[in-house]
Image: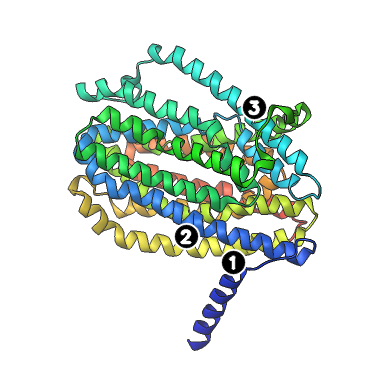
Amino acid sequence: MNGFINKTINKIKNAMSLLVSQNDLETEEGRSREREKRILWSAATAALAKVISTAIPLITVKITLSYLGDELYGLWATIISFFSLFAFADLGLGNGLQTELSRASGKQNNSEKCRKIVSSAYLMISVVAMLLIMVFVVVFPLVDWSGLMSAESSTAKAMTSTFVMAIFLSKLVGIPVSLVQRTQNALQEGYISNIWSSLGSVLSLIVVVVFASLDLGRAQMMWFSSFAVVITSLLNSLFFYVIKRPDLKPSIRFIDFKITKLLLSTGILFFILSIITSVSLSLDNFIVAKVTSLSETTPYSIAYKVASFIGIISTMLSTPLWAANGEALARGEYSWVKKQTVKMTNVSFVLSFLASVFLVVLSKPVLGWLGSGTQVSYSILIGMCFQQILIATANPAFMVLNASRKIKIQMLMYGIYSVLSISLKYVLGQMYGAIAIAWVGPICYLAIICPFVAWSARNVLGGKK
């Protein structure tokens, strides 16, 4: 027992030493330590950001449930779930930027190319956002949004269009504004974007509390809370490109159409992959609303928020690993990538499993505090946690594929998973209710995605485990 404690203490000391270390980037060993240092910083701040962004809705849910009511809260959750499909609206350019910029930063004397990549990405993504806003303005009045979102009461029907417009426009405006986060992640400076993300979550909390406490209006609360993240992303962009990294500031002079073509070729594959993964992983609330009712969507969505705490593991480890892998692979340092992939896979599994046990134990008192109408069965929550464990454990292997541009193989595996899981969720959800929807996802993920991604990453890293 003493040996285990001493070993743990030594690991903590080594980690603390690594956080403040100054490394020689001219040597392979120094670069390895610098990558690990940045991963650690990004992981720590990502964990903080994820805890804040996940905890704040749980803190405010009692206020919002009381202020909006069960049906309007369920409507809010359903619209957010539905429009999560539009996470791919940047045509994959954000992912393309992250992959290409991380690889370019791994080569010496490449600062001009890095700025060309950033400038070209901003041009294309701004054009895409403007076109989507124009299309939305034309299509918006032609769609029966209340029917599409299964709104039943007169109040919900009257508020649906407002909720849809606030959420959708904030997401579209946020596409080019939030591109700074991709730039920071690609340069292994994700800890900066994580700090700003935390500030955005805090701003959302302030908006909800103030608007609900002063009864400033449900629609107004929706508008301000939706744009809180956009505001903080804009401030992040100004700070990063004007003060910290003016050498990367987007400029028309640095737009390069050869690089534009490269970003598009990489991005379009990520675009298709994003569609498939969003459809397969983000539609649960929407399916529950369709096969049951909006009232049942509320406890299901709250349980999902509880389970999403485990997503901390994926966010804090995988995002910085993607960029670090890209830089290391560009230098041909495969041994580092192999070592870190195995290490992060083991760490992700252990941490996500422990987090799941912790959340299941605490779920009953937490949901009980929110009210009897928010109670869900342990069977549903455990199924959601199982899914999160699998995602967290598989993500390090996915980061190898992302960094090495192995995107088509991901499209294939998620295509198979998407068709099978969504079909089973809809059919079995009608037969057995929400519990079937919670369990179909992880079972299909374990049978299809996990073996597929492990085999693919092994091939990229030279056939070794």
**In the rendered view, would you say 164 is above or below 300?**
above
Question: Which residue in the protein does label 1 denote?
Answer: 19
| Residue at image location 22% in from the left, 38% down from the top | 212
Estimate the x, y position of residue 401 in percent, counting from the top left: 68, 47
How far across and down, in percent of the image, does residue 228 sit? 40, 37
Q: Secondary structure at mark 3?
A: helix
SS class, disc 1: helix
**Disc 1 from disc 3: Cα separation:** 36 Å
Residue 311 visible, this angle: yes
Rendering coords of residue 69 (x, y %): 20, 35
Q: Residue at x 44, y 52 (%)?
A: 50
402 with respect to 261 (left or right): left
Mark 2 lies on residue = 352
Provide the residue designation for mark 3.
123
Quarter of the figure with residue 147: top left
Question: Which amino acid type is shown beneath numbered disc 3?
Answer: Leu
Asked if disc 1 and disc 3 are in contact, CB closer than 8 Å, the reply is no
Q: Residue at x 50, y 50 (%)?
A: 194
Q: Position of residue 351 (x, y in %)?
A: 48, 63
Closer to the chain start, of discs 2 and 1, is 1
Q: Amino acid at mark 1?
A: Leu
Q: Nearer the viewer, mark 2 or mark 1?
A: 1
Nearest the eye: 451 or 138: 138
- Classify 10 Å Cα crowding around label 3: few (below 14), some (14-19), many (20 and above): some
